[in-house]
Image (spheres, helix red, strand yellow):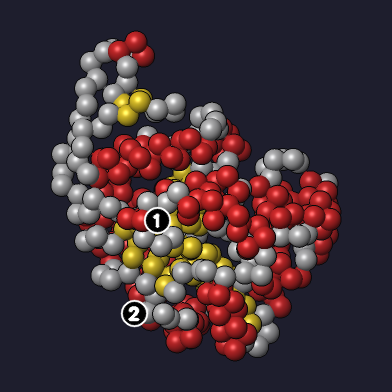
Amino acid sequence: MRLGVTIDYSHDFTAAAAETVEFERAGAEVVAVSEAYSFDAVSRLGYLAAVTSTITLASAILPIYSRTPTLIAMTAAGLDSVSGGRFELGLGSSGAQVIEGFHGVPFTAPLGHLRETVEICRSVWRRERVEHLGKNYRIPLPADEGTGLGKPLKIINEPVRRDIPISIAALTPRAVTQTAEIANGWLPIFFHPDHAQAAWGDALTAGLAKRDPALGPLDTIVGVPLYIGENGDRMFDAYRQRLALYVGGMGARGANFYNDLAVRYGYADEAARVQELYLAGEKAAAAEAIPDDLVRQTALIGTEAEVGERLAAFAAAGVTTILSSPLALTPQARIESIEAVRAVVPRT
C-alpha cells in the first residue's frame, strides 16, 4: 500500500507546499492536488515538481469538461516532463452544478467523454497523429464543422513516458465498471471497507473481466482524513459535517451520487433523512443523522493502534494507495502523523 497526502483546493498553498517537502522526507510516496472551481491544480503541481524530488505528483482530479482531451494529454506530458516521470493523471467528470454553472459547458455523456479522453491521451503520448472520430470528440474537426483546414497532428515533444498512469474518479456501478476496464487506477470517495463489496463488487468484476492485462492490477486510491490522538471527537465531528454536505447537499434530490452510494452501503433510511434535513437548511441535524459507522469506518482517526486497524481493513478490502488529509493542528504534528502511519502501513 502506498501512502500519500492530499492538498485541498482551499488550502494555503504556500504552507502546503512547504509541508509537502517535509511529508516527502517523512516517507509519503504520493501528493495529490485537487481542483474544483478554484485555483487550478496544474500550476500547483508544476511548483511541487520543482521543490520535491521523489514523491509522485497526482491530479485528483482534473475535470474533463473544462479542457480538451488533447490539452489534458499535453498537460500530463508536461507535468511528467518537469517532474522527471513522477506524474499520475487523475480524471473525473465533476458534476453538472460546476460544469454547467461555472464553466458553461453541457454536462452530457460523462462515461463517453471519459472513455474517449483516455483513448486520446494515450494516442498523444504515443506520438501518433491524432485522428479520433467519436460521439463526443472529433479530431481533426470535420470540414463541415469548421474551416476545413484542420489536419492530423502529433505532439511535438517526446514524452518522458508513453504510458502515464491514468486514474478515474468513479462512484456509480457503470462508471466503476468502465474505470476497472480502461484505467490504471480508481478513485472512489468515502470508501467503506466493510461495504465496498456490496456497493461495487459486481461492477469491478465486470470491468476487470474486460481489462487489458497490459494495464496491470487496478490501483485503488482512497482519500481519508487522518488524525492520530487519544481524543479524535472534534475531528470526527468535522468529518461528519463534510459527509452531510455530500450525502445531503451535493446535487439535487434524486440526482446525488453520494446519497446513492450511502444507499448502496445499506443506509437507505439514513441517507433519505440526511438529504431531507440538509435541503431544508437544517445542516447540524443532517450531520447528526449521518450513521456513526459511516463516519468512523471511512476515516483514519484515533489512536495509533486504531489507525493501524483501519489501515489493515482498507488493505484487506483491496485498497492499494491511501491519500491522507492530515488534520493535526500544527505542521509538526501533521508531519509526525505521516511518520506514524508510514511505520504501520501494510506492505506486500
Q: Is residue 234 left or right of residue 105?
A: right
Position above or below: 14 against 300: above
Dot 2, how many residues are within 10 Å of its Cα: few (below 14), some (14-19), or many (20+)? some
Q: 51 or 164, which is in the foreground?
A: 164
* Residue 281 spot, x, y in % from top left: 80, 49
* Residue type beneath disc 2: Arg
Res 210 visible: yes
Q: How many marks?
A: 2
Q: Is residue 257 left or right of residue 69?
A: right
Tell me which residue sits at (37%, 34%) in the image. Answer: 68
Q: Secondary structure at mark 2?
A: helix
Can you say which quadrant of the picture contains the N terminus? Answer: bottom left
Residue 25's label in the rendered image is 2
Tell me which residue sits at (57%, 87%) in the image. Answer: 304
Tell me which residue sits at (30%, 44%) in the image. Answer: 122
Residue under numbered circle 1: 184
Tell me which residue sits at (48%, 54%) in the image. Answer: 208
Q: Are marks 1 and 2 in contact (CB under 8 Å)?
A: no
Q: Is residue 254 left or right of residue 141?
A: right
Residue 342's label in the rendered image is none
* Residue 287 spot, x, y in % from top left: 77, 61
Q: Hey, which quadrant is residue 141 in on the image? A: top left
* Residue 315 spot, x, y in % from top left: 52, 74
Can you say which quadrant of the picture contains the C terminus? Answer: bottom left
Q: Secondary structure at mark 1?
A: loop
